[in-house]
Amino acid sequence: MRLEKPVNPLKEKSYQFAIKIVKLSQSLISVEREYVLSKQIIRSGTSIGALVRESEFAARRADFINKLTVALKEANESEYWLMILFDTNFLTEIYFKELSTNCKELIAMLVSSIKTAKNIK
């Protein structure tokens, strides 16, 4: 009998968000011929998951908290770029709402994780 590892919701959600952001960036480049904003959103949107992964092997709690704090900043930046893309008509309302909701959920999860880590004695 093989036991499955428990799913880390933050790790999974940040990974799935990164995939959506990569697809968005590809579309911005190939369909819209938009190169500047696509690079901004891919950098911030994919770094959230990378930082969450880095935090898994943090040497100390302070390092863990720092990695998640930087991931939170990247998520906040991603939300900004999504708003810019929507307000400049590069994103449909439906696609914007989906990505924005995902991003806000990541922000909430990161805030909660950081608060929990700070309160562990």
Image (cartoon, rainbow, N blue to C red):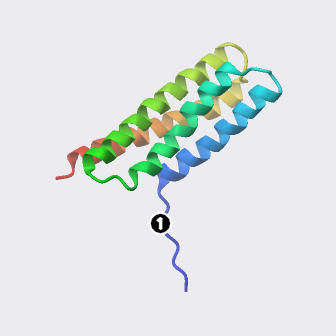
Q: Quadrant of residue 1?
A: bottom right
Relative to 90, residue 107 above or below: below
Point 75% across, 34% down: residue: 26
Horizontal side of residue 81 vs 112, given as left or right: right
Asked if residue 101 shows in the view, the reply is: no
Element marked by disc 1? loop
Q: Quadrant of residue 87?
A: top right
Q: Quadrant of residue 94?
A: top right
Horizontal side of residue 86 vs 56, given as left or right: right
| Residue type beneath disc 1 | Pro
Per the image, the residue denoted by label 1 is 6
Residue 50 position, x and y percent, is 50, 45
Point 30% across, 45% down: residue: 63
Q: Residue furthest right?
A: 31
Residue 13 position, x and y percent, is 54, 47
Along the line of sight, which residue is nearer the eye, 86 or 63? 63
